[in-house]
Image: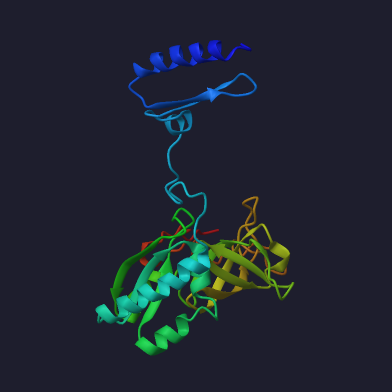
Amino acid sequence: MARASNRDKVLKVMRKALDADKSKSYVVEVSPLGLVEMTRQNVTDGVREILTELCPTCHGEGVVLSAETVALDGLRKMREISAEKGDEAFLIRVNPKVAAALTDADSGLTELEEETGKRFHFEGGDANAIETFELVESGTRAAIEERALPFKVGEEVLVKIDEPHMYNADDAVARIDSYIVSVTGGGPYVGERKLVRIEEVERAAAIASLLGGESANGQADASSNGASNGDGLESDAPSRKRSRGRRGGRGRSRAKQGSSDE
């Protein structure tokens, strides 16, 4: 279409046809390459909108808040909670990464507790979105610690040794959600399940001593079930009660092994 009159005829017919379209459109002149440029109002969802839905965490923004950011906002909310409620302690549900950030020595939580005279504990698994922050329960310090702390001093629990201790190769670490159990002498048993006794309990971590327990293949160690004495004979002492550690305080379940006579 070298002639301008022919190009004008094409544009006239095209614009007339678009007039019947309910959607708004705009047509520009024919380009030097012989192309007609136009825009048309989009009145329906695209393929992406039809086949997908917004992320419930970032709501389509493509980014999520960092654990440190949520922890800082959480400190502000905890200050408001402590001012509104007269209870001694509070249990907050958060993502484990946020709990780790809040219980860090430099998070400011210790200063907040000293200022307000309140005590805060945290619970929650990886299924919680990173921005989760919910007040679960409030009450006396003893009652909240009973609910929040997964263990008591002297309790014997069966845990899986997850990895070597960062600072002591002879020790190891077990994890229950965001709660850390440092197992003295557990270094050689990484990947195995062992029976341990809880020696110290803190808000974010506990220290335990190795007693023995079941290894990954389910075989019982001598120290926890029918151990043989120096003469090669099996002891007739009853086996220990075992419990598997799980975050949740009063709500956790414990698998117990009854006594058996040889």
Report whether 106 appears left or right of 137: right
Residue 202 location in percent, x, y?
Answer: 49, 78
Q: Quadrant of residue 252?
A: bottom left
Q: Is residue 56 above or below residue 51?
A: below
Q: Quadrant of residue 170?
A: bottom right
Q: Nearer the viewer, residue 134 or 211?
A: 134
Q: Quadrant of the N terminus?
A: top right
* Colour scheme employed for the rendering of this structure: rainbow
Task: Estimate the x, y position of residue 79 in percent, counting from the top left.
Answer: 35, 79
Looking at the image, residue 106 lies above or below residue 124: below
Percent of width and height locating residue 213: 60, 62
Q: How many marks?
A: 0
Which image quadrant for residue 84?
bottom left
Near-viewer residue (246 or 54)? 54
* Residue at x 42%, y 47% (from the top left corner): 56
Instruction: Name the side, left or right, on which 18 lies relative to 213.
Output: left
At 35% from the left edge and 83% from the top edge, which residue is drawn? 118
Left or right: 191 with respect to 135?
right
Query: Can residue 204 be seen at all in this image of the molecule?
Result: yes
What residue do we see at 45% from left, 34% from top?
52
In front here: 192 or 63? Answer: 63
Visible in this render: residue 242? no
**For the C terminus, which image quadrant?**
bottom right
